[in-house]
Image: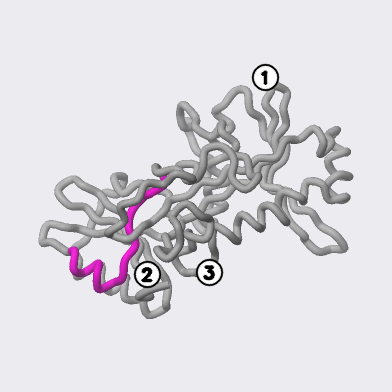
C-alpha cells in the first residue's frame, strides 16, 4: 500500500523509509481476529526487522493516567546508522472521493461507511496522537529508557488506498496517484457491469490489504450477490474483487446513492 503523500502535509511528515527491498522470510504469526489496522502494524514491525539499520525501541505503548488510558504510542524506532530516533504513528486507510470537493483537499476523502474521514484523521494526529509524546507521563517513562522527547523526531507512516467514481478522470497533485486502487459504486451499478466471463470474490476486511491477483478461488455472480446484499441491508460498504480474462479490479460497493 503506497504512502498517501510524499513529503509533508499539514505539518505531518511522512516516514519515507517504508519501502523495503524484500519481505521477511517468515512473517510473525498474526491472530485472525486482529483488526486491519493492527494487522498493518504487525506487518510494519516485520518489515522493520528486515532492515539492518532499523530497530524498534518501543511498540504499542499505552499511556495511562489515573487508571485511564489516554492514548498509545504506535512505535519508536532507532536508525543505528544515523543515530536518529523516530516516533512514528502508523495509519492504514481506505477512502472514497466526494465529488463535490476539489480532489486535492483533505475534505474530499471519506471512509466508505462515512464514519471517518481524512480531515478528521489528520486533526487527530495533530491534536492528540503526536502530542502524546510530550505528555508528562510519557516523558517520565522515556526517561527510564534513557530517552527524551527532544531527541525523537516525529513522523507518520500514512498509507491509503483511494476509491473513485467510474467516470473519474482527474490527476492527483497533492496526493499520490498510486493510491488510486479502484472504484466505488452502488449495488445496482455494480450489477450493470457484469459479463458472463466475470468472476468475483468478497474479501473479509482483514484481507483488504491483499492484491486480488493472490486470490485462487473465484465465484459466479449468483453466488456473490447474497453476501453483498447482506452488507447492503446492514448499511455497510463491502469490497468486491473481480476477475475478467486475467484482469483484476477492486470495487467498493456502498449502500447509499450519494454523499
**The quarter of the displayed image where residue 81 is located:** top right
Q: Which of marks 3 and 1 is in front?
A: 3
**Cα gap from disc 3 to disc 2, whole angstroms:** 13 Å
Mark 1 highlights which residue?
Answer: 81
Q: Is mark 2 on a helix, strand or loop?
A: strand
Q: Residue at x 25, y 73 (%)?
A: 188
Taking the view exactly as shown, the residue that stands out farthest to the bottom is 233
For label 3, the residue is 115
Mark 2 sits on what residue? 254
Residue 147 found in image quarter: top right
Figure check: 18 above or below 122: above
Label 2 Cα crowd, 10 Å radius (few <14 / some 14-19 / many 20+): many
Dot 1: within a 10 Å radius of its alpha carbon, few (fewer than 14), some, or many (20 or more) residues? few
Q: Which quarter of the rendered picture does the N terminus lie within?
A: top left
> Are dots 3 and 1 in contact, CB under 8 Å?
no
Q: State the extent of the magenta-drawn residues as a range.
A: 179-193
SS of the residue under disc 1 = loop
Q: Is residue 184 magenta?
A: yes
In this rendering, position of residue 29 left or right of residue 61: left
Percent x, y for residue 239?
Answer: 36, 61
- Cα–Cα span, label 3 and label 1: 42 Å
Q: Mark 3, residues whose alpha carbon is within 10 Å: few (<14), some, or many (≥20)?
A: few
Amino acid at each position: 500500500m503506497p504512502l498517501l503523500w510524499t513529503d509533508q502535509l499539514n505539518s505531518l511528515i511522512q516516514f519515507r523509509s517504508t519501502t523495503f527491498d524484500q519481505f521477511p522470510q517468515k512473517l510473525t504469526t498474526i491472530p485472525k481476529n486482529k483488526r486491519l489496522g493492527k494487522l498493518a502494524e504487525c506487518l510494519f514491525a516485520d518489515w522493520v526487522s528486515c532492515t539492518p539499520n532499523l530497530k524498534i525501541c518501543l511498540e504499542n505503548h499505552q499511556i495511562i493516567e489515573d487508571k485511564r488510558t489516554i492514548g498509545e504510542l504506535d512505535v519508536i524506532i532507532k536508525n543505528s546508522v544515523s543515530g536518529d530516533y523516530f516516533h512514528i504513528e502508523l495509519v492504514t486507510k481506505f477512502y472514497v472521493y466526494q465529488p463535490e470537493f476539489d480532489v486535492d483537499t483533505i475534505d474530499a476523502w471519506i471512509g466508505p461507511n462515512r464514519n471517518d474521514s481524512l480531515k478528521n484523521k489528520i486533526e487527530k494526529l495533530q491534536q492528540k496522537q503526536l502530542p502524546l509524546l510530550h505528555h508528562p507521563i510519557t516523558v517520565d517513562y522515556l526517561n527510564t529508557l534513557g530517552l527524551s522527547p527532544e531527541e525523537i523526531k516525529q513522523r507518520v507512516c500514512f498509507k491509503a488506498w483511494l476509491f473513485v467514481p467510474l467516470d473519474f478522470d482527474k490527476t492527483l497533485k497533492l496526493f499520490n496517484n498510486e493510491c488510486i486502487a479502484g472504484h466505488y459504486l452502488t449495488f445496482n451499478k455494480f450489477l450493470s457491469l457484469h459479463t458472463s466471463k466475470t468472476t468475483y470474490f468478497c474479501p473479509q476486511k482483514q484481507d483488504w490489504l491483499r492484491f486480488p491477483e493472490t486470490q485462487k478461488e473465484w465465484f459466479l455472480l449468483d453466488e456473490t450477490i447474497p453476501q453483498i446484499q447482506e452488507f447492503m441491508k446492514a448499511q455497510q460498504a463491502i469490497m468486491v474483487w473481480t476477475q475478467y480474462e486475467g484482469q483484476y479490479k477492486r470495487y467498493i460497493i456502498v449502500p447509499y446513492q450519494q454523499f
